[in-house]
Image (tube, helix red, strand yellow):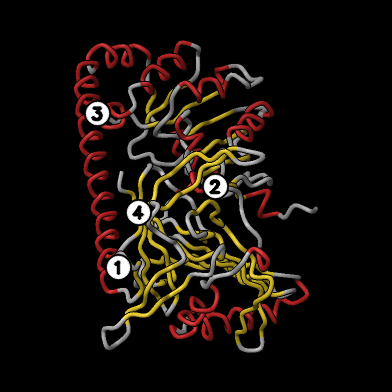
Amino acid sequence: MKISEATRTYFAKDVYSIWKSRVSKAEESITVYSPYFDRLLISLLGNSQLGNENITIVTELNPASLLEMPNQLRALKNALSNGIIVLSTPRLHAKVLLTDDKFVAIGSQNFTSYARKSKECTVIPAATMTGSSFVDTLIRWREDATSVDENFVDMLLSKISRHIRRHKKLLEETEAEFDELFKNHEEEKQNALLRRLEELERQSHIRMSQGVVYASIEHISGEWDYYDSLIADHEYDLTRWVVKKPGGNTEPYRFSRLAMYPMIIAETGRMGFARIGKTRITYIRKSLNWSNRRLQVGDYSLGVSITFPVTDTKKRNIVVRLTHPYLGSCEAAFLFTGDAFRLIRKHYFKGNSYWNEQHEAFVKELDSGFFGDLDSIASFFRRFFTSFTYKELGLDNKNVRDYLKGLHFRLTVIQFQGNPVLVIKKQW
């Protein structure tokens, strides 16, 4: 497959290997501009075929930076000891690799080991930039910078070590307090979801005849294997519920035995479709493709697939993909909280390039006729978050333990858009 010019130029990943290639191919000079670096930069420059007198590091000797990155001073000492030229210029924030004064790599990635695992963006043009105002400016920065000598670095290492130790201790205390505040904040969000679901449970017209269902995880010895299952206490039948009528009376409400129903874990907001038996839940679908139902938006008939994320489920716990045979698709993330089904974000993917103009019309129709229409969103939940059977869409693995962390659980039912949703809450 042909690689586009943009793909060869713009990178949203670690670019150390490209830096290494540029350094090894340099024929005349190497200049690195960076306010932050550590021994990774020294290792990188070790790939050069040039003498160290042709290598320059332009940085900023900033007290705040040195406190945060004490390894930078040691890397500076190493560079100077090996004959690499080190210069300092105030307010430098650029991260640039300039080779032979004509090839550049510029971006957010620092020349540190930590940055290799960070989310970084870099631009690396293949063409020479000799004579450009950009390279001319870089050269001027280098020429105007002040030389850093090894004796000064030795003094810094000996005199500010105590300040570095104090800063490290303060940073550790700050990080500990930050982690505690974040933990408390997440717990409060979790408790808010629990309170919301509990209120919806109280308002729900569907309930167990005895009120709620209690169930425990048990290890089952099957005919061919061993597996975990959520087993209801002996007095409960998971398929038999009652629905409260407007006058206050109740009448039986039956879950279809062995059908899959939408469910939500109260503590995390994670969702799935649980296969409800008379006494147990063993299978939970993590995704499904509605092969026998399609979504009609204007003139477009769309395939519907649904997946339930494992992580960050308080931000979005449902991902819907709407697919047209040749115009492309849209992936939309939703958050379901028991009383709302809210769009968080969406992203369109183009189909065959032959249909680019039609794709634009497709996007416009979905934005206005579906995502921009609250009634359409509500109707979507009613239609695609209803029960189905094994015969229709199959099962998943015996995976209840993947969802439930604990031993004993409380089961209730809430309603949204007329559909029952099973709520599972950990007791202990």
Q: In this view, does 45 lie above or below 382?
A: above
Which residue: 56% across, 43% down?
A: 13
Q: Is mark 1 on a helix, strand or loop?
A: helix
- Which residue has dot 3 on it? 172
Q: Earlier in the sequence, mark 1 or mark 2?
A: 1
Residue 14's disc number: none
How far, Cα to Cα, is label 1 from label 3?
43 Å
On the rendered structure, is 264 left or right of 198? right
Residue type marked 1: Glu
Mark 1 vs mark 2, CA separation in Å: 26 Å
Q: Residue at x 78, y 75 (%)?
A: 354
Residue neighbourhood size for the residue with mark 1, other residues' Cα within 10 Å, grouped as few (<14), some (14–19), many (≥20):
some
Amino acid tagged 2 = Asn
Residue beneath label 1, please? 201
The answer to whether residue 246 is above or below residue 107 is below
Q: Label 1 to label 4, Cα distance in Å?
A: 15 Å
- In terms of sequence position, does the residue under pointer 1 or pointer 4 come before the other? 1
The amino acid type of the residue labelled 4 equals Tyr
Q: How far apart are marks 3 and 2 (CA)?
A: 40 Å
Q: In this view of the protein, which residue sits in the foreground, 77 or 15?
A: 15
Q: Of the residues under marks 4 and 2, which one precedes in the sequence?
A: 4
The percent coordinates of residue 221 (x first, y second) are 57, 38
Going from N to C along the chain, the mark reached first, 1 or 3, is: 3
- Amino acid type, callout 3: Glu
Q: Do the residues labelled 3 and 2 touch (CB within 8 Å)?
A: no
Find disc 4 in the rendering and name its residue: 214
Residue 109 in the image: x percent, y percent? 48, 39
Image quadrant for the C terminus?
top left
Which circle marks residue 399 in the picture? 2
Work out how far the residue at label 4 is from the one at label 2, CA to CA, in angstroms. Answer: 19 Å
